[in-house]
Image (cartoon, rainbow, N blue to C red):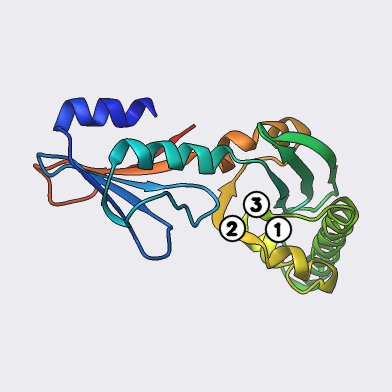
Amino acid sequence: MSWIVTFTQRHGAGSVSRDEAGVTVTFTAADGAAAECHPPFPPVRWAGSGDNGDPAAAAEAIVAHAVAARTIGVLLVRLGGYAVGVFAGSPPRLVSSKTGSRPVHGRSAAGGWSQHRFARRRENQAASALRAAADAAAGIFGPYRLDELVLGGDKRSVAGLRGDARLAPYLGLATDRFLTVPDPRLAVLKEIPRAFLAIRIRLTEPESDGSGDAEPVN
């Protein structure tokens, strides 16, 4: 991983540790700077002890873990649109997919009975759109044995799918990393491995008491 070489050159060689759950791996440099890594699809493990291990070996293990062959389901949902796909192998290849959209009108500024009627119509349109997304997910995921599920779009729309019993086995595989996408189209779906494979890094400079921003690393 080129970033760990740059980090070491800038801050000095140090140590590496991980949390008990294997969710984060932290590189601590000689000057006190820290790079807290969040690999995809935890837990991540490497040979040796959990603390004060070899940074180079840990960096290699993180990369190997991130790019390991898996069967990944992806479900991107926003109100009125969805994209469902299955990626397999290393690098991930899109082997099955379906996208779709349904019209959902915006909120009405009118009042009285017209507003209530419009609101009911909008609710029915939203429910129909979510059913279409659930139908697509059940059909696309069904033939595959998924290792992980990646969710994205907007959280409110995804939450509307959790009551569908057909999706319960897949939603139980969902990762904590939620991918916010503006428009779930096929082009977006094809590029989504870059997001779900990214190793997110939070840098803390020794001069600062606060944490830096998390940065995705491919």
Of pointers 2 and 3, the one earlier in the residue sequence: 3
Image side of residue 18 versus residue 116, left or right? left
Q: Tag 3: residue type?
A: Val
Label 2–label 3 contact, CB within 8 A: yes
Which quadrant would the N terminus be assigned to in this image? Answer: top left
Determine the residue positioned at 44% across, 42% down.
62
Kind of residue at badge 2: Thr
Dot 1, crowdedness within 10 Å: few (<14), some or many (≥20)?
few
Cα gap from disc 2 to disc 3, whole angstroms: 6 Å
* Earlier residue among tags 1 and 2: 1
* Mark seen at residue 84: none
Mark 1 or 2, which is nearer the eye? 2
Give me the residue at 72% from left, 62% from top: 110
Name the disc covering residue 150, or none.
3
Q: Which of 17 and 93 is in front in this view?
A: 17
Residue 177 pos. (x, y %): 54, 54
Provide residue 196's location: percent of width, then percent of height.
58, 43
Q: Is 21 drawn above or below residue 28 in the view shown?
A: below
**Among the two numbered marks 3 and 1 on one chain, the one whose residue lies closer to the N terminus:** 1
Is 58 left, or right, of 164 in this rendering? left
Kindly identify which residue carries mark 2: 175
